[in-house]
Image (cartoon, rainbow, N blue to C red):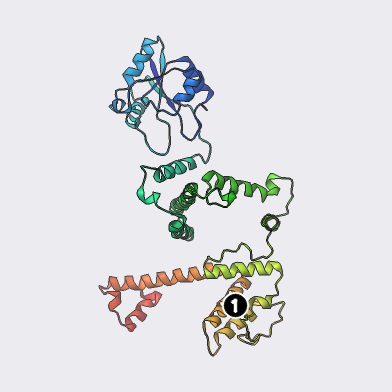
Amino acid sequence: MTPLVTLLETSTRVAPGLLTADAWDLVRRVPVCCADPAHPQLAALRAAGVDVTVLAGPGEASDGCALEPARALAAAAGASEVVWLLEPAGAWPGLAAAADTHLRAHATGEPAGVRLLAGTHDLPGARLLDVVAVMDRLRSPGGCPWDAEQTHGSLAPYLLEEAYEAYQALEDADPVELREELGDVLMQVVFHARVAEDATDGHVDEGGGRFDVDEVANGIASKLVRRHPHVFGDVDVAGADEVVTNWEAIKKAEKGRRSVTDGVPLTQPALSLAAKLQRRARKAGLPADLVVAPVLTEGASPADLAPRSAAHPETLSGRSLAAAVASYAAAPDLDERGVGELLFAAVALAAAAGVDPEAALRARARAFRDRLAGAEESAHADGVDPADQDVAAWRARWSPTSR
């Protein structure tokens, strides 16, 4: 009788030796072989008393002739079955990939006599380990020269760029693109963590710059547990608003912050920064009129650039805020400070209307982009280079009815 060849599937995402009960029963009962003398499971199996035979080096096994030597091993042992350790599933194919591909083809074809058995099962999220492994390979000796020379500073622009590309995928409602762009954002997280792992000035808790991706993951997991006591503890909440209130209270206690503006990243886009600061100020109870009052410099008068609005300071309405915006815009000498006041008041107006100013401006910019691209396409359709058009032609093509 021809011995059955069982192809045992394992994963580098699971610690060696953590096999299923069926897999352990099998490897203790029948001969076991593989093509790779450095197979990650060898040490664990041999420590448990399982004798594993390396039938051929990866180069020899890659010719696709490993099936018969495996059966010969079983026959010599008087066994009706033999286990072949497939290359573990992981981030990239190893040296025995060719032999494994050949054997897997037999498991799904004819004649019978070859089967697949899952020896391990990945938990949800296990593929994140592949990202860590690939990045480690890229940054290690013999990896990629470009990746190896990157620093936190050199990578900083890419972090913003990838985040913006993911944001655009959200705006475009393109889930396929979003999946890819989130992967690029994740790569930046893993990249920065791997760069930090190479720091030589000591651990981050001791004033240095060294930490690793496990510390990053542990930090966010612990934070999520701490700030969701209604999920992981015994706190009761009435709804989402109370969740937010609790989150802010817990964060304030953790950070020891003295100002509601602490922790607001000043590097974010200006409109986002203004909106964030205004939201924090409103939560702190700052009077509404002070939100749009000019920020005075030394020697300036409160009347400078003051919005000409008769609205009650505690109940500024959308209309009065609009009047404040118009007042700033109508200033006789509109300089940099005046434009800043104008834009800050416009952010407050957006908040009063329940509108995200960043999203509103982005939507307006995208609409402009679409209108411009449409006008250009109209010119191209007529065989005209858009740059060669006169003003009248541009105006004619700018109308939506012209396209």
Compared to 164, does 347 lie above or below? below
Compared to 27, does 178 lie above or below? below
* Residue 244 seen in the figure: no
Q: Could you tell me which residue is drawn at 55 percent across and 77 percent down?
A: 343
Compared to 300, does 1 lie above or below? above
Residue 244 location, quadrant:
bottom right
Q: Residue 188, how many percent across, how many down?
A: 46, 52
Element carrying mark 1: helix
Compared to 282, does 174 lie above or below? above
Q: Residue 291, how many percent across, how many down?
A: 65, 75
Residue with the mark numbered 1: 345
Within-10-Å neighbours for mark 1: few <14, some 14–19, many 20+: many
**Residue sticking out furthest to the left:** 383
Q: Quadrant of the N terminus?
A: top left
**Residue sticking out furthest to the bottom:** 332
**Residue sticking out furthest to the top:** 78
Q: Quadrant of the C terminus?
A: bottom left
Q: Residue 328, how many percent across, how many down?
A: 57, 84
